[in-house]
Amino acid sequence: MITLFLLLLIAVIIIAWQVFPLISGYGAKYLASSIYLQHRNANDVIKEDLGDFPKSLASYTFDEKDSSVTGSVWGFAKRKAIYRKGLGCTLINEFSETSIRRQQFDLPAVPASNADTIPWPYGDKIIDSIPSAVNIAALNNAVNNVMKESKNGVPAYTRAVLVLYDGKIVAEQYAPGFDKHTVLLGWSMSKSLTAAMIGILVQQGKLNINAPAPVPEWKGSSKEKITLLNLLQQTTGLDFEEVYTRPSEVTKMLFNYGDMAAYTAKLPLKYKPGTVFNYSSGNTNIISRIVRQTIGERAYAAFPYTALFHKINAYSFLLEPDASGTYIGSSYSYGTARDFARFGLLYYNNGKWNGEQILPENWVRESVVSPAANPYKNYGYQFWLNGKDEKDSTKEAFPDVPKDMFYMDGYGGQDVYIIPSKKLIVARFGVHVIDENKFLKEVIQSITIVRLKYK
């Protein structure tokens, strides 16, 4: 009996040793960014965003003097996240807090302008007229439905919904405490932003996606055959598991390692490159470090802003770096709903903005082609596609949505859906996922209803 008790105790200790740092690290980082970037009330964040088990096991302390949040589980596994102006929050891992705070980032200033006097999409002035193709009552009903959506009595906590038709804002709604100025966490929508940076470097002639990926750790090994295209299409073959309900490569990378790209690059090959699709945030963080190495240390920090965000008048975007100083391209981007929609509009317009071809002319078309290695045909260059349902490959993932839809997708239902055939861009942000197909179907019907009437 004593032996059994000791074995159970040892098992509990081992599990706690692995799991508690992930819980406290996730919570400390999330809460810090919510407070210092979104200016939210800490109690609201803990209740709504961190209230689910096992995240609810953590408790937090705050230090206003050094702008930090420390999380722990029953006093164990303390993890600290620090805020730095212009950089958001960083979880302290591998590198000392002193060395992280000493890092230098040369960030560009936001151009001085009054966005409220400049018409959308170059500014925030909205023309009140609604296109005749839009049934505004039906559209507002669809938006209202998703704002109130819940599952098993648990609210989805939708924070923002934005709908563009033919490039124009035709619906926009926010939850209490959020508005058009609130920056929202993109989670894995960040991957699509990172892919666009690669497109810009390809256009500049600095990268070739068909060449071996410039990853120093892979020189002279079997991983040397991994191409930048493999990284973009999630077919590297690296042994990386993207599971968040237990310790896995993705949770270890995000909450236990300070140099996320280095951690992923050292993982072994499980499959021959190019032969198996395996969605991996690690691949994207390797891509993000490739951007850093290609641009060079001096210009790297400013590059996403000067080459992409500011060019599309998206001035709220903020990328958070890991402890090594590389932007966490897989997961940690913040921006307003309008700025995420602007990025969607860039892709809707085939990579062109205000007359300038920011992405290569064929980049968007290539981005929405799934590799042969992906049996579901649901992923391109860090964008999801309207392919097969991964739980049942005989069904469509979005049966009531046109096949040409492609979208940015983040944990908890952060999404920007681009539907060229319907002239639609639909953005939704929240804490929990919604019935995406139902929501999009209702939005699409609000357009097609009027079209049929006047046909």
Image: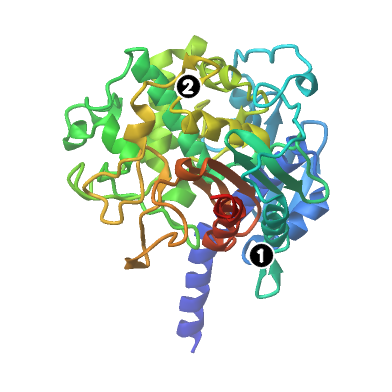
Q: Is mark 1 on a helix, strand or loop?
A: loop
Residue at mark 2: 352
- Left or right: 243, with 276 as reference point: right
Picture quadrant where residue 93 is located: top right
Answer above or below: position of 196 versus 206: below
Give the residue drawn at x 49%, y 57%.
244
- Left or right: 330, with 148 as reference point: left
Where residue 208 sits in the image (x, y, percent)? 27, 21
Answer above or below: position of 162 versus 20: above
Where residue 419 sits in the image (x, y, percent)? 48, 44
- Left or right: 295, with 72 as reference point: left
Give the residue drawn at x 63%, y 25%.
314
Q: Which of marks 2 and 1 is nearer the N terminus?
A: 1
Q: In the rendering, which numbered label is found on residue 52? A: 1
Give the residue drawn at x 57%, y 36%.
166
At label 2, which amino acid type do we have? Lys
Q: What element carries label 2?
A: strand
Nearest the eye: 342 or 238: 342
Mark 1 packing: few (<14 Cα in 10 Å), some, or many (20+)?
A: few
Find the distance from the CA under tag 2 to the CA under tag 1: 42 Å
Nearest the eye: 133 or 270: 133
Answer above or below: position of 444 versus 151: above
